[in-house]
Every structure is written in C-alpha cells, then in structure tokens.
Amino acid sequence: MPNDYFQFKKFVIKQDKCAMKVCTDACLFGAWAANSIQNSKVKIKNCLDIGIGTGLLSLMLAQKLNNAKIDAVEIDEAAAQQAKENFEASAWKERLNVYNLAIQQFVNSAIRQFKYDVIISNPPFYENDLKSNDTKRNIALHSAELKLDVLLQVADELLNDEGLFFLLLPFHRLSEFEILMNEIFFIREKALVKQTTKHDYFRCMLMLTKKSTTSSQSEIIILKEKNEYTDDFKNLLNDYYLYL
C-alpha cells in the first residue's frame, strides 16, 4: 500500500486524497521538464499544469523556476484540495494557484487572464482500455474526461507563440499522438524511457513548440544492475530525491 506522503528534499507530497500517487515516471518527467526549460534559457514568467493530481509537477517546476507563477487546473475536487494543501505547505505557496474545474472550462473562464510560457501535463493515459471500479482512478488514468486531441486544442489556445508544451505519454500512444499533432505542434525534444536495458520503452517525454524546429531524441534508462538508479536518472533527480 503506498505511503500517505512522499518526502522530497525541499517539499512534501501528501497523497491520501488522490487516486494517483507519486510514481517514478512522473518524478522523472517533472525533473526532465524543469531541466529542459533551464537549458532553453527562455525567461519563464508563468506556467500552466493541466491535470495536477497531487501537485507534484507544479512543485518540481516551482523549485527550479525562480519567480515563475504556476496555475494548476484539476477536475477532481479531492485531488485539487490535496494539491492546494501541498502548495500551502511549500516554500513557493505565493506563486502557486489551484483551480478546481475542467481545463475546457478554464480556457473560456474569466480566471484565465493571459497565455502561458510553459504548459505541462501528465494527462489521462488510456483510451478504450479496461477500467477499474474506482471512479476517481478511472478519471485520473483514462482519457474519457480529456482526450488527447482536446488537450492539443486547449494547449494551442493557452500557450504563447514562443512557449513550450511538455507532455508525458505511454510509449504505445506516441505514433497516435504524432498524427494528432497535425502541425499544431512540433517536437523539439523527445526522450524515450525504459525501466532497464532489458525492457521495452514504456513512456515518452515530449517538449513541443508551435513553430517548426529541429528535433532531438534521447533515451533514459531508470535502473541498472542490482536495481540501482542510472547516472542519467540520478543527475536529473538529484535535487529532488531525498536519498540521492
């Protein structure tokens, strides 16, 4: 049974109210996105986190992006409340805002006052796959509430022309997503993730832009022999994981 909280070096994630708990691939994604933003050397004033769950990704970005304001949108009431509690307990609470509504509503609401320099999302993964009896977990995992084509339209509406859009996907949906992009977005960076060298790819991390750009691809392996983290993984998570 997962712990009710996850301790990072500079913040704590409480997760007793959330269907989706802190997981390794989400932590890797947050660290990779923050690192990619810093390497881009683009000045970031504001970010949007779509489907925040516990608030993990927002907090990871807040730790790295000094002074950036982060708006976080979550459809599930309990998860939104959990994220708000995690934000309030952090050192960056004044830069973090939670909105408990569907992202489709947020797009057209008076709350949203500007377009964003960065959008990040770990969206519902599965479409037409078997569902569990846990309604909240189904919303968090499955795309009935937020399909990828809708997410693309929303991101296109909310992202600045020079902005960066970060997305975590299951590897088996990458080809489908690349078709859906249809010149709305272009891949600037793609990182394919394996658990070990002996496993197949299971996640894909993307950095997207609105303008056509050269694309780079990399591979990240989480574990090496004896279940030790690889150097690539440790370099990305060193500022976050308590025991690295």
Image: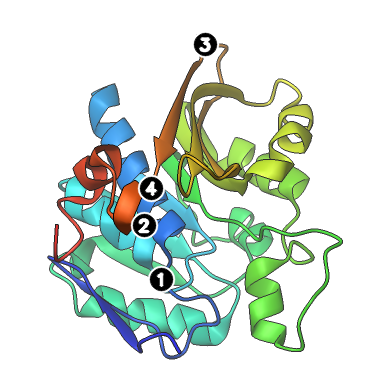
Q: Are marks 2 and 1 in contact (CB under 8 Å)?
A: yes
Q: Nearer the viewer, mark 1 or mark 4?
A: 4
Residue at label 4?
Answer: 222
Measured in 3D between alpha carbons, the distance from the residue under mark 3 to the one under mark 1, in whole angstroms, is 33 Å
Task: Give residue 12's quadrant in the image.
Answer: bottom left
Q: Nearer the viewer, mark 2 or mark 3?
A: 2
Q: Are marks 1 and 4 in contact (CB under 8 Å)?
A: no
Measured in 3D between alpha carbons, the distance from the residue under mark 2 to the one under mark 3, in whole angstroms, is 27 Å
Q: Is residue 142 left or right of residue 112?
A: right
Amino acid type indicated by mark 1: Val
Amino acid type indicated by mark 4: Ile
Residue at label 2?
Answer: 27
Image point (60%, 47%), residue name: 169
Q: Which circle marks residue 38 in the picture? A: none
At mark 4, the secondary structure is loop
Q: Considering the image in quadrants, where does the C terminus appear?
A: bottom left
Q: Are marks 2 and 3 in contact (CB under 8 Å)?
A: no
The mark total stands at 4
Amino acid type indicated by mark 3: Thr
At mark 2, the secondary structure is helix
Q: Which circle marks residue 213 in the picture? A: 3
Name above or below for residue 63 compared with residue 138.
Answer: above
Disc with the residue nearer the chain's start (2 vs 3): 2
